[in-house]
Amino acid sequence: MPDGLTPKAEARLSLNSRLAKLALVRPWVDVLAAEHHIPEEKVFAINLCLEEALSNVIRHGYLGERDHRLTVDFSVDADGELVFTIEDDAPRFNSSEFKERPAPASADEIKPGGQGIQLMRKFANSLAWEPLPHGNRLTLGFHYGAPGGEPR
């Protein structure tokens, strides 16, 4: 391939449930970013949210068991929002965990763990979870521009 040209990214990234496979996420997002002219600060937010969500599925959904499937699909919706959809075949996620919790009032109130959804809410513009007949679907939406903003 000639210098300066970026390979076209696949709209789907398929992984198995090994934490080491998360190393494939950043290069995939980098190719998408080059192809779709996604600003660097948005690439940071996308990577952070995808890695958090995928590691949670591997660690909590699959309980560290290897060789389960995970897919991440990328699309741009009619409004121009960048949409990443993660699907797994893990046991259904406890939807009560998905409800928004109040932000900690101080650093003393922050406890290790359990902050992943809060983090994704901060960096993604939209966040939706739905159960599937055999798994879960998490959809993360990102507007072009600075990370975060008001979720839809």
Image: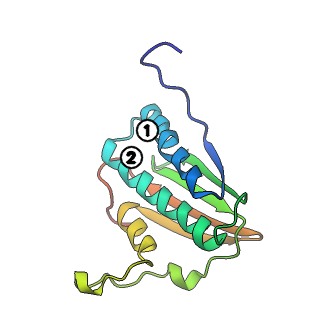
What type is the residue that disc 1 sits on? Ala
| Residue 53: % across, % down | 52, 63
Secondary element at image label 2: helix
Looking at the image, which is closer to me, 38 or 7? 7
Against 21, residue 89 (above or below) is below
Q: Which amino acid does label 2 sit on?
A: Val
Quadrant for residue 88, please give it.
bottom right
Q: Do the residues labelled 2 and 1 touch (CB within 8 Å)?
A: yes
- Separation of marks 2 and 1 at Cα, in angstroms: 7 Å
Which residue does the numbered mark 2 point to in the structure image?
Answer: 43
According to the picture, the residue beneath numbered tag 1 turns out to be 33
Mark 2 crowd level (few <14, some 14–19, many ≥20, 10 Å Cα): many
Observer able to see residue 85: yes
Image side of residue 72 versus residue 50, left or right: right
| Dot 2 or dot 1, earlier in sequence | 1
- At horizontal 39% and vertical 35% (from top left) the residue drawn is 37
Residue placed farthest to the right in the image? 133
16 left or right of 84? right
Position in image of residue 145 (x %, y %): 31, 48
Identity of the residue drawn at 45% across and 38% down:
30
On residue 55, the disc is none
Identity of the residue drawn at 33% across and 60% down: 148
The answer to whether 77 appears left or right of 133 in the picture is left
Residue 41 spot, x, y in % from top left: 31, 48
